[in-house]
Image (cartoon, grey):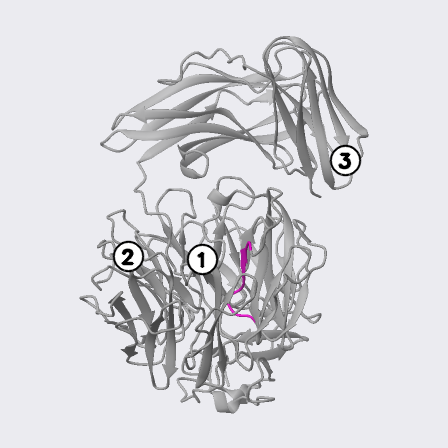
Amino acid sequence: MAAGIGYIEGEEICFIRRYDMMRTVILTLACLVAGWAAAAPDHLDPVTLEVDGGRLLAQPDAMGRIHATTEAAGRILQVAGADDFTPFPGWPKTASGNAWEGGICLNLDADPDLEVVYHVGNNVYAWNSDGTNVPGWPQSTANFYQSGAPAAGDIDGDGALEIVVQGIYTMTQGRIYAFELNGTVVPGFPITHGYATRTIVLADLDGDNDMEIVTNKRLYPVGEAWVYQGDGTVYPGWPKPLDSVPSSSAAVGDINNDGNPEVIVESYYQLHVWDANGNPLPGFPFVLTGGATNSYSSPALADLNGDGYREIIFGTHGSSNLVFVLRHDGTLYPGWPQSVNSWIYSTPAVGFIDGDNLLDIAVGDQILSATPMNKIYAWNANGQPLAGFPIEPLNSINSQILLADLDGDGYTELIVDDNTQNAQGQGKYLAFNHDGTPLTGWPLVTQGTTMFNVPSLADVNGNGILDLAGGGSASSQTNVNLWASTYAYLPASIQIPMFQYNLRHDGLVPTAAVIPPEVEIVLAAVGTPQVPPGGGSFDFNATLINNGATPANIDAWIMVQLPNQAWYGPALGPLALELPGGSSITRLRTQNVPATAPAGDYWYVGRVGVYPGVVYDSSGFTFTKTVSGDGGLGAGENWACTGEPFPGQGSQTPLIPSGLALSASPNPFNPTTAVSYELPAASRVSLRIYDTAGREVATLVNGWRDAGAHQASFDASGLPSGIYFAKLEAGGTAQTLKLILLK
């Protein structure tokens, strides 16, 4: 049989045991049949293809079919450990069974730390940051095995969150469980509901400040959409019939701008929308076209054009593999649908990816293949592909992609799952930059595949460092890990921190679209900038252009990327400017580079947008410093940017601070950081670094300095990872700053 794409029929796979949570199989060419095959509707657990000592996992769709190539040989890529993540002590945690769509991080007790909550197999676990069980946990869901991630919300109106999960047994039975934060069962639970697929959604449908529970029920070959109240009773007006089986989570949000939430539920062939009382919205259900069908790609809700109405974004599979965007009235949004090569199980990730302040949409596709042949696709709201996309070739992507500025460069990175395990049983999370290039320090290795294991991003222990909770599934068990990264925790830069955006998993994109102004920035060096060992300066022209017809209110700033790839700045700004329509301004500027700046090549880049995270346009050039300086700042040494002022910028005379100030960037750092300090008056200055035992490990400054801003470089190449303290003494006062070295 020639290599190609086909569909695996459930009966042709040799299952080890009918209701094992993970079934291991060996597929041969005879198992692969071209075209559609009638599948048994009770084979919906993942199957495993063993190739070259490794494993590939695949998930049947809602009707039991698997998208696969007819190729039976291949390779599993070996992965290296991620340099930027360190497991918390006491982790990973191993639990029997599998976990779908990840866990959540929230505070369950009196201490300030967050806890990690997962539904694995038939138990709901809650772990402290040190890996110990939270008192009152785990809680059993009896013979009912997880069907998705835990959700958290106040369902009973007591002012505290509850944990809600659903469990299933075979293809006909299921229960919904609700627990207080201390693990006690909420009155009215569990609910004997029936077989429901994927993650519970919580939403306040009636505005009474408690959450309702939104789920589905599979009644092959049809289904139902259900809503329960926080006491376990059925919400008035529900359930609602579905034309065919459901397999994804619902989404809940106000799409028609009437001030009330709507409930969006997928069936295999249609997408349904009801108001809170169960009345269908005009234009729905939407019947899928082009042979497309729904399974696991839950809808996301976002206002793509800033008109106050949210669009519905979801992915499909089948004869056509399409990403749909629907208006609130059920009509297609301009530029959509967009097609991909293979099936889409990935819930769309909607957020700002390329920094142009126009919402973007990213998904991955999946096919069971022994060689990587899948892609990550990304488009802007108008359906135009983003630069650098699609990213290929990759193994299957099944989960929603997380979006966050991980490394603090002002641009969004993408975190994705992977359906492989190597010969040692290791899986991996991958991460990519906004331009499609791999993110340095990744992949992040797990024990077991990350397929459908959506990670969670949070600062679990409150130390200002980004942490990641994620899991790998292997041999009917899940290994949940908690890692500390080297990245600063910047919550405003995390757009999707967990499955479906929040603890409620309602699919509601929190940021409405803003159409960006048509502005440009051009930075052009005068000559070829080269700075001597003793420090110096270079000149450049900065031009701002508004190509639009109306005035544009923007921020403008300049950043410096150091030879070690760390960022310093802003060297200029941020400046709040108003550019008249059709105008441009050019200013000749001078950038000072201190003697203490390390030797090497620098990237000097100007940005316009909304400081610091939204970039409409950028432009820059390189300059070189030949030899590092003496490690101390002389009088007047700093990164001052002077010259012709921009409108509204005011005097170029550096401001004299009112008091002593101390800061560092980057922080955390590896291995160097720029320590900046400000003096209200000229004085003798001491700037020293100490370890946690009080031992001095470095002297950065010891001498006379003028009033104003100064900077010194701290190189910790010879020091171990850990916490250090910078102590600034001047004019009879002192300031101390905690520094975090993460190698």
Q: Position of residue 692 (x, y in %)?
A: 77, 35
Q: Position of residue 299 (x, y in %)?
A: 36, 64
Residue at the image position 60 percent from the left and 84 percent from the top: 25
Rendered image: mark on residue 65? none
Q: Estimate how packed mark 3 is, as few (under 14), some (14 to 19) or many (20 or more) residues with alpha carbons within 10 Å.
A: few
Front label number (1 vs 2): 2
User: What residue would you read off at disc 2?
Assistant: 254
The mark that comes first in sequence, 1 or 2, is 2
Asked if residue 102 lies in the magenta stretch, the reply is: yes
Query: Which residue is at the front of the view, 633 or 17?
Result: 17
Task: Give SS at disc 2.
Answer: loop
Q: CA distance from mark 2 to mark 3?
A: 52 Å
The mark that comes first in sequence, 2 or 3, is 2
What's the amino acid at mark 2? Answer: Asp
Q: Is residue 75 visible?
A: no
Q: Estimate how packed mark 2 is, as few (under 14), some (14 to 19) or many (20 or more) residues with alpha carbons within 10 Å.
A: many
Task: Give SS at disc 1.
Answer: loop
User: What residue would you read off at disc 1?
Assistant: 390
What's the amino acid at mark 1? Answer: Pro
Whether tag 3 and tag 1 are in contact, CB under 8 A, the answer is no
State left or right for residue 405 relative to residue 548: right
Considering only vertical position in the picture, is 260 above or below 609? below
Dominant secondary structure of the residues highlighted in magenta in the image: loop
Query: Which residue is at the front of the view, 229 or 372?
Result: 229
Rendered image: mark on residue 692? 3
Front label number (3 vs 1): 3
Task: Give SS at disc 3.
Answer: loop
